[in-house]
Image (cartoon, grey):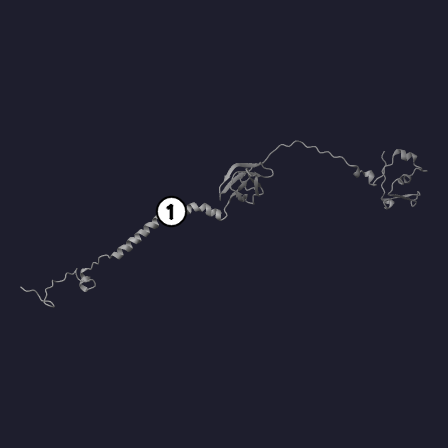
Amino acid sequence: MVGPVIGDGSLSPPESPVQGRCGTDRSRAAGCFRPTSHRSQVQSLNSLSTMKRWVTILPLLLLLGGLAWPFAALGQGVTSATISGEVLDENEEALPGANIVAVHEPSGSRYGTTSGESGNFTIANVRVGGPYTITVSFVGYQSKREADIQLDLGERRRFSFQLQPQTEQLDEVEVTAQQGAVFDESRKGLSTNISEEEVETAPTIDRSIADFARFTPQAIVGNDDDDGSSISIAGQNNRYNSIFIDG
Protein backbone atom coordinates (compact mmCIF):
# COMPACT_ATOMS: atom_id res chain seq x y z
CA MET A 1 0.00 0.00 0.00
CA VAL A 2 1.30 3.47 -0.84
CA GLY A 3 0.98 6.30 1.72
CA PRO A 4 -0.29 9.74 0.95
CA VAL A 5 1.94 11.97 -1.07
CA ILE A 6 2.62 15.39 0.46
CA GLY A 7 4.41 18.17 -1.34
CA ASP A 8 7.33 16.72 -3.22
CA GLY A 9 6.07 13.22 -2.88
CA SER A 10 7.95 12.31 0.37
CA LEU A 11 6.16 10.53 3.12
CA SER A 12 5.62 12.49 6.39
CA PRO A 13 4.12 11.06 9.52
CA PRO A 14 1.25 13.01 11.10
CA GLU A 15 2.31 15.68 13.61
CA SER A 16 1.83 14.95 17.27
CA PRO A 17 -0.05 17.63 19.19
CA VAL A 18 2.88 17.94 21.55
CA GLN A 19 5.43 18.20 18.77
CA GLY A 20 3.67 21.10 17.07
CA ARG A 21 5.10 24.58 17.30
CA CYS A 22 4.19 26.61 20.36
CA GLY A 23 1.89 29.41 19.40
CA THR A 24 -0.22 27.43 16.89
CA ASP A 25 -3.80 26.56 17.50
CA ARG A 26 -2.99 22.91 17.83
CA SER A 27 -0.22 23.52 20.37
CA ARG A 28 -2.43 25.72 22.51
CA ALA A 29 -5.16 23.10 22.47
CA ALA A 30 -2.85 20.25 23.41
CA GLY A 31 -0.62 22.30 25.75
CA CYS A 32 2.85 23.60 24.94
CA PHE A 33 5.78 23.00 27.32
CA ARG A 34 8.86 25.13 26.85
CA PRO A 35 12.05 24.00 28.49
CA THR A 36 13.64 26.55 30.92
CA SER A 37 16.42 28.44 29.26
CA HIS A 38 19.93 28.63 30.72
CA ARG A 39 19.63 32.40 31.21
CA SER A 40 16.53 32.06 33.38
CA GLN A 41 18.25 29.47 35.54
CA VAL A 42 21.24 31.79 36.13
CA GLN A 43 18.95 34.67 37.15
CA SER A 44 17.12 32.46 39.66
CA LEU A 45 20.39 31.31 41.19
CA ASN A 46 21.59 34.93 41.50
CA SER A 47 18.36 35.98 43.26
CA LEU A 48 18.62 33.07 45.70
CA SER A 49 22.26 33.89 46.44
CA THR A 50 21.41 37.57 47.08
CA MET A 51 18.60 36.61 49.48
CA LYS A 52 20.94 34.32 51.43
CA ARG A 53 23.47 37.12 51.77
CA TRP A 54 20.79 39.48 53.17
CA VAL A 55 19.63 36.83 55.64
CA THR A 56 23.24 36.51 56.84
CA ILE A 57 23.96 40.26 57.00
CA LEU A 58 20.71 41.34 58.75
CA PRO A 59 21.50 39.75 62.17
CA LEU A 60 24.99 41.21 61.98
CA LEU A 61 23.56 44.70 61.39
CA LEU A 62 21.19 44.32 64.33
CA LEU A 63 24.07 43.23 66.57
CA LEU A 64 26.23 46.16 65.51
CA GLY A 65 23.32 48.55 66.06
CA GLY A 66 22.88 47.28 69.62
CA LEU A 67 26.57 47.70 70.37
CA ALA A 68 26.63 51.19 68.90
CA TRP A 69 23.68 52.45 70.99
CA PRO A 70 25.74 53.55 74.05
CA PHE A 71 28.20 55.37 71.82
CA ALA A 72 25.33 57.05 69.98
CA ALA A 73 23.94 58.19 73.33
CA LEU A 74 27.31 59.67 74.19
CA GLY A 75 27.45 61.41 70.84
CA GLN A 76 24.06 63.00 71.49
CA GLY A 77 25.21 64.46 74.83
CA VAL A 78 23.56 61.98 77.25
CA THR A 79 26.34 61.91 79.85
CA SER A 80 24.39 62.30 83.09
CA ALA A 81 21.56 60.87 85.18
CA THR A 82 18.45 62.25 86.92
CA ILE A 83 17.22 62.00 90.51
CA SER A 84 13.50 62.54 91.13
CA GLY A 85 10.91 61.66 93.74
CA GLU A 86 8.35 62.92 96.22
CA VAL A 87 8.32 64.18 99.82
CA LEU A 88 5.37 63.30 102.08
CA ASP A 89 4.44 64.10 105.68
CA GLU A 90 3.32 61.68 108.38
CA ASN A 91 -0.18 61.56 106.82
CA GLU A 92 1.26 60.72 103.37
CA GLU A 93 0.28 64.14 102.08
CA ALA A 94 2.49 66.33 99.91
CA LEU A 95 5.09 68.37 101.77
CA PRO A 96 6.03 71.38 99.61
CA GLY A 97 9.15 73.41 100.31
CA ALA A 98 11.26 70.53 101.62
CA ASN A 99 15.01 70.83 101.02
CA ILE A 100 16.66 68.01 99.01
CA VAL A 101 20.47 67.73 98.75
CA ALA A 102 22.34 64.99 96.84
CA VAL A 103 26.09 64.67 97.52
CA HIS A 104 28.50 62.75 95.27
CA GLU A 105 30.73 61.30 98.00
CA PRO A 106 33.96 60.73 95.99
CA SER A 107 34.11 64.29 94.60
CA GLY A 108 31.99 66.19 97.13
CA SER A 109 29.77 67.62 94.36
CA ARG A 110 26.42 68.82 95.72
CA TYR A 111 23.11 69.01 93.86
CA GLY A 112 20.10 70.61 95.52
CA THR A 113 16.47 71.56 94.96
CA THR A 114 13.16 71.96 96.85
CA SER A 115 9.92 70.04 96.55
CA GLY A 116 7.07 71.65 94.65
CA GLU A 117 3.44 72.18 95.59
CA SER A 118 2.64 68.52 94.90
CA GLY A 119 5.68 67.35 96.89
CA ASN A 120 7.58 66.24 93.78
CA PHE A 121 11.18 67.18 93.00
CA THR A 122 13.68 66.63 90.16
CA ILE A 123 17.47 67.01 90.07
CA ALA A 124 18.67 66.75 86.46
CA ASN A 125 22.18 66.50 84.96
CA VAL A 126 23.59 64.55 87.89
CA ARG A 127 27.05 63.07 87.56
CA VAL A 128 27.05 59.36 86.68
CA GLY A 129 28.43 56.91 89.25
CA GLY A 130 28.43 57.21 92.99
CA PRO A 131 27.94 56.52 95.73
CA TYR A 132 25.46 59.35 96.41
CA THR A 133 23.87 60.40 99.69
CA ILE A 134 20.48 62.15 99.53
CA THR A 135 19.27 64.16 102.54
CA VAL A 136 15.73 65.56 102.83
CA SER A 137 14.91 68.12 105.55
CA PHE A 138 12.04 70.39 106.52
CA VAL A 139 11.44 72.75 109.44
CA GLY A 140 9.72 70.93 112.30
CA TYR A 141 10.38 67.45 110.82
CA GLN A 142 13.09 64.85 111.30
CA SER A 143 15.55 64.68 108.40
CA LYS A 144 15.60 61.58 106.18
CA ARG A 145 18.73 60.21 104.48
CA GLU A 146 19.36 57.67 101.71
CA ALA A 147 22.97 56.51 101.17
CA ASP A 148 25.05 54.26 98.85
CA ILE A 149 23.18 55.23 95.68
CA GLN A 150 24.73 54.35 92.31
CA LEU A 151 23.52 56.03 89.10
CA ASP A 152 23.99 54.65 85.57
CA LEU A 153 24.25 56.59 82.33
CA GLY A 154 20.88 58.05 81.36
CA GLU A 155 19.18 56.54 84.43
CA ARG A 156 16.21 58.30 86.05
CA ARG A 157 16.07 57.11 89.66
CA ARG A 158 12.93 57.93 91.68
CA PHE A 159 12.66 58.02 95.48
CA SER A 160 9.89 58.50 98.02
CA PHE A 161 10.63 60.18 101.37
CA GLN A 162 8.17 60.35 104.27
CA LEU A 163 9.14 62.73 107.08
CA GLN A 164 7.96 62.48 110.68
CA PRO A 165 7.31 65.47 113.00
CA GLN A 166 10.13 66.36 115.34
CA THR A 167 8.98 66.56 118.97
CA GLU A 168 11.48 67.75 121.57
CA GLN A 169 11.02 68.78 125.21
CA LEU A 170 12.55 72.22 125.71
CA ASP A 171 14.04 73.40 129.00
CA GLU A 172 12.67 76.44 130.79
CA VAL A 173 14.14 79.69 129.55
CA GLU A 174 14.32 82.70 131.88
CA VAL A 175 14.80 86.11 130.31
CA THR A 176 15.98 89.05 132.43
CA ALA A 177 16.56 92.63 131.37
CA GLN A 178 17.93 95.75 133.00
CA GLN A 179 17.02 99.26 132.08
CA GLY A 180 19.91 101.24 130.75
CA ALA A 181 20.92 104.69 131.89
CA VAL A 182 19.81 106.15 128.56
CA PHE A 183 16.18 105.44 129.43
CA ASP A 184 16.40 106.89 132.94
CA GLU A 185 13.42 109.22 133.38
CA SER A 186 15.47 111.61 135.49
CA ARG A 187 17.78 112.27 132.52
CA LYS A 188 15.05 113.11 130.04
CA GLY A 189 13.90 116.24 131.81
CA LEU A 190 10.38 114.87 132.13
CA SER A 191 10.40 115.06 135.90
CA THR A 192 12.26 116.72 138.74
CA ASN A 193 12.93 115.09 142.09
CA ILE A 194 13.48 117.43 145.02
CA SER A 195 15.21 115.88 147.97
CA GLU A 196 14.46 116.55 151.59
CA GLU A 197 17.70 118.46 151.95
CA GLU A 198 16.77 120.78 149.08
CA VAL A 199 13.40 121.46 150.66
CA GLU A 200 14.99 122.41 153.97
CA THR A 201 17.68 124.61 152.46
CA ALA A 202 15.64 126.28 149.71
CA PRO A 203 15.39 130.07 150.18
CA THR A 204 11.71 130.75 150.73
CA ILE A 205 9.69 133.06 152.87
CA ASP A 206 6.25 131.51 153.06
CA ARG A 207 7.33 128.02 151.98
CA SER A 208 4.85 128.03 149.10
CA ILE A 209 4.70 125.30 146.47
CA ALA A 210 5.63 127.92 143.91
CA ASP A 211 9.01 128.30 145.55
CA PHE A 212 9.80 124.65 144.97
CA ALA A 213 8.34 124.61 141.46
CA ARG A 214 11.19 126.82 140.39
CA PHE A 215 13.48 123.78 140.61
CA THR A 216 11.70 122.40 137.54
CA PRO A 217 12.94 123.78 134.19
CA GLN A 218 9.50 123.35 132.58
CA ALA A 219 7.76 125.41 135.25
CA ILE A 220 7.07 129.12 135.01
CA VAL A 221 5.98 130.87 138.17
CA GLY A 222 3.89 134.03 137.75
CA ASN A 223 1.79 136.39 139.87
CA ASP A 224 -1.65 135.96 138.28
CA ASP A 225 -3.49 134.18 141.07
CA ASP A 226 -5.07 135.73 144.11
CA ASP A 227 -2.35 134.31 146.30
CA GLY A 228 0.20 136.14 144.22
CA SER A 229 1.65 133.20 142.22
CA SER A 230 0.68 130.87 139.38
CA ILE A 231 2.51 127.82 138.04
CA SER A 232 2.56 126.99 134.32
CA ILE A 233 4.12 123.66 133.28
CA ALA A 234 5.38 123.39 129.68
CA GLY A 235 3.40 126.45 128.66
CA GLN A 236 0.06 125.08 129.81
CA ASN A 237 -2.45 127.02 131.87
CA ASN A 238 -2.16 126.58 135.60
CA ARG A 239 -5.64 125.09 135.66
CA TYR A 240 -4.18 121.93 134.12
CA ASN A 241 -1.87 121.39 137.08
CA SER A 242 -2.52 118.50 139.41
CA ILE A 243 -0.66 118.35 142.70
CA PHE A 244 -0.55 115.22 144.87
CA ILE A 245 0.92 115.10 148.36
CA ASP A 246 2.21 111.76 149.58
CA GLY A 247 1.47 111.26 153.28
Rendered-image quadrant of the N terminus:
bottom left
Instruction: Depth check: give the residue in front, 29 or 1.
Output: 1
- Quick one: SS at disc 1? helix
- Residue drawn where x is 42% and y is 46% of the image: 66
Residue hosting label 1 = 60
Q: Name the residue furthest bottom.
A: 7
Instruction: Depth check: give the residue in front, 167 or 98.
Output: 98
The amino acid type, in three-letter code, at marker 1 is: Leu
Q: Position of residue 168 (x, y in %)?
A: 61, 33
- Residue drawn where x is 54% and y is 41% of the image: 87
Instruction: Depth check: give the residue in front, 241 or 1.
Output: 1
- Residue drawn where x is 79% and y is 39% of the image: 182
Instruction: Depth check: give the residue in front, 109 or 221.
Output: 109
Q: Name the residue furthest right.
A: 205
Q: Quadrant of residue 213?
A: top right
Q: Position of residue 189 (x, y in %)?
A: 84, 41
- Image height of 2 relative to 140, above or below: below
Q: Quadrant of residue 244?
A: top right
- Image height of 45 relative to 172, above or below: below
Question: In the shown orientation, is residue 187 left or right of residue 24?
Answer: right
Q: Name the residue furthest left.
A: 1
Rendered-image quadrant of the C terminus:
top right
What number of labels is visible? Answer: 1
Q: Quadrant of residue 179?
A: top right
Question: In the shown orientation, is residue 180 left or right of residue 61?
Answer: right
Q: Name the residue furthest top.
A: 171
The crowding category of the residue bearing disc 1, from other C-alpha atoms within 10 Å (few below 14, some 14 to 19, many at least 20), is few
Q: Position of residue 221 (x, y in %)?
A: 90, 43
Q: Position of residue 92 (x, y in %)?
A: 53, 39
- Image height of 4 relative to 160, above or below: below
